Image: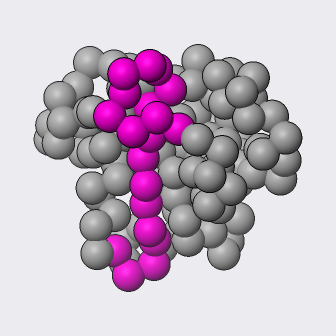
Amino acid sequence: MSREALVPADARQLLFICSQNRWRSLTAERLFDAHPHYEARSAGTEPGTRVRVQAGHIGWADAIFVMERCHADMLRTKFGPELAGKTIINLRIPDKFQFLAPLLIDLLRLRLREHLALLSQ
């Protein structure tokens, strides 16, 4: 969850988590549509979310990106054993953006660039 967390060099499957999986994490997932090196999925932590995070999501992911610390805390509480050996990175993106908002896209790219070597390819 710390800013210093390193994504494994061979990470290809990225999971993005926010509260409702409607704006932030879904926008992050869309950034990777047809990307040649990464596959992305997204999910939410709250009841009534578009897609609620399940153990299968955690197992599938090589790296997990959360939008806020509360999302990482929830994952650790609910999926502790499944998170063993997984990287969780907090992108520190507040819940104030609409789906595909240009500022959100720019912020995601900026925050992800330091963790994903193949992002620009």
Quadrant assignment, res 75:
top right
Side of 1 where 99 appears, left or right: left
Which quadrant of the figure contains the C terminus? bottom left
Q: Which residue is located at x 50 percent, y 26 percent?
A: 45
Residue 69 at least partly seen: no
Counting from the top left corner in percent of width and height, residue 100 is at 17, 42
| Residue positioned 54% across, 65% down in the render | 13
Q: Which residues are magenta?
A: 35-53
Quarter occupied by the N terminus: top right
Considering depth in this image, is 106 or 75 the residue closer to the camera?
75
Q: Is residue 101 left or right of residue 76?
A: left
Give the colour scheme shown.
one colour
Image check: 5 left or right of 50? Answer: right
| Above or below 112: residue 34 | below
Secondary structure mostly seen in magenta is: loop
The picture places residue 3, in percent across and down from the top left corner, at: 65, 37
In the rendered image, residue 5 lying in the magenta stretch gets the answer: no
